[in-house]
Image: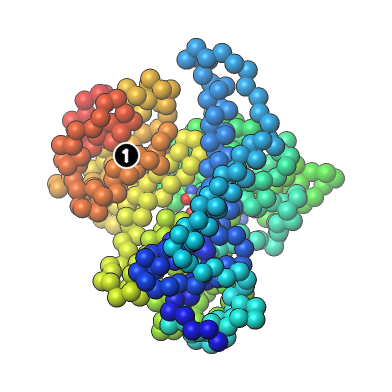
Amino acid sequence: MEKVKLLIIGAGPGGYVAAIRAAQLGLEPVVIERSDVGGTCLNWGCIPTKALIAAAEAYSSAISSGSMGIICEPSFDWTKVIEHAKNAVSKNRKGVQFLFKKNGIRLVSGIAQFTGKKSVKVGETEFEAQNIIIATGSKVKDIPVFAVDGEKIISSDHALFQEKLPKSIAVIGGGVIGVEMAYIYRTFGVEVTIIEALETIIPFEDHEISKELTKEFKKKKIKIHAGAGVEKVEKRDSKMVVILNDGKEIEVDQVLSSVGRSPNTDDLDLGTAGIETDERGFIKTDHLFKTNVEGVFAIGDVIATPMLAHTAEHEGIVTVEQIAGIKVHPIDYRLNPGCIYCQPSIASIGYREFEAIEKGIEIKVGKFPFSANGKGVASNHTTGFVKVVTESGTGKIIGAHIIGYGATDLISEFLPAMKLGATVYDIIESIHPHPTLCEATLEAALNSIGRTIHI
Ligand code: NAD
């Protein structure tokens, strides 16, 4: 049995970032990974989708740049588009491998399994650790009535790298993965139908944001069936037929199932260590990521916090610093930004308008469209708006929601601002560079107090 200070199971964004911070703090982490470093985010999620989205944006701006005097007849080679995504993955993976070497982190390849409260085996090797962090992430949720077969019914894992595009696809689930994949496939000419059980696509966003994306997707001729769940999916000849519980039938070549993800705990043998999970299979932790077993922590998608790479990274750092004896603070998940990278892109933080109203908070809302923003007009990025939700009277910013080009970068203005308890007056008194899309943020703040300049 090898004795180690810190064992980290999983080298996704949660695990590998925790390992780097742990190495910096002298905790000499050993990381166990059964596949490639980088986890879902780098290999099957954020990075390859962003590469495909960048290609989709390049293609669609080539198509639409005639109004700027650019004359071309764009076409695309899907094989090369996929190659671009694979290259992005491989470069980023090499980057993480380099960081492991640079920080002297030992990486053990194989499947980790608990053999006791503080012991884990990987193949023939057994470790006893002072502390263990479980960062094993999540996997695609499979629903029996439309079980993924990798050919006719695929998951996002298959959709990212499939060699041939279908003529038509039904996307079951209009959440984050559903709308990002719908945007990519539609841009490359596939007929896309999104089926969402709830009343709108991206139902968890501010209502005006969901409405705006629905409008923009309809302009792209993406069909949307919201408010109807899927009863079953049948194969009829070479077609797939999606049967909805309102009786409608949708015939397509392929089906993408994007109805959520579930925690990855199958191989861990948590029972042997006595680590508790909740009814959905997530590992239970307290607000500082401690499981019920002393010295065992869990972070990232395997616990019931938002399934986002940046959230997992932050949870990893808080956990490792805590193990090293540094005073840490519980994470305020209200200040955890959410981003959707289709076009128009979406980013949000804090209270949505309806949520603040439900909570009985007296609010004022400010909004500003990119169609009235100088840079937006000059660069043909006029879709969408910035919306701020503020506390009446004080002007304290309690929510920000952006839809439009660059939203996922523009949201950053609100992160330290809200962490520091900023008001719209702080935003207004900050000189914003001109001409930039971030002036829409300034104008939304002005709008919340009736002082908009450019409308
Ligand atoms: P999700 O929870 O975001 O969306 C799933 C959607 O499917 C929901 O809107 C739900 O109402 C709908 N649905 C469920 N069952 C259905 C049915 N039978 N018929 C029709 N609709 C149904 O899940 P996801 O999009 O699969 O993403 C998984 C996780 O990964 C999420 O937590 C997401 O935040 C994360 N993720 C984040 C990003 C990003 O940050 N850009 C990208 C990809 C994934």
Quarter of the image with the C terminus in it: top left
User: In the picture, which quadrant includes the N terminus?
Assistant: bottom right
In this view, the residue in front, 5 or 255, is 5
Give the residue drawn at x 53%, y 21%. Answer: 64
Kindly tell me whether residue 372 is visible in this rendering: no
Neighbours of disc 1 within 10 Å: few (<14), some (14-19), many (20+)? many
Asked where in the image residue 316 lies, by quadrant, the reply is: bottom left
- Is 424 left or right of 227, judged from the image as shown? left
Q: Residue furthest right?
A: 237
Q: Eyeballing the image, is 61 above or below 274?
A: above
Q: Position of residue 17 (x, y in %)?
A: 43, 61
Image spot of residue 33 (x, y percent): 57, 67
How many callouts does the rendering have? 1
Relative to 3, is 172 above or below?
above
- The residue shown at (55%, 52%) is 94
Say which residue label 1 marks.
387
Q: Is residue 427 above or below residue 270?
A: above
Q: In the image, 453: left or right of 253?
A: left
Q: Nearer the viewer, residue 234 or 48?
A: 48
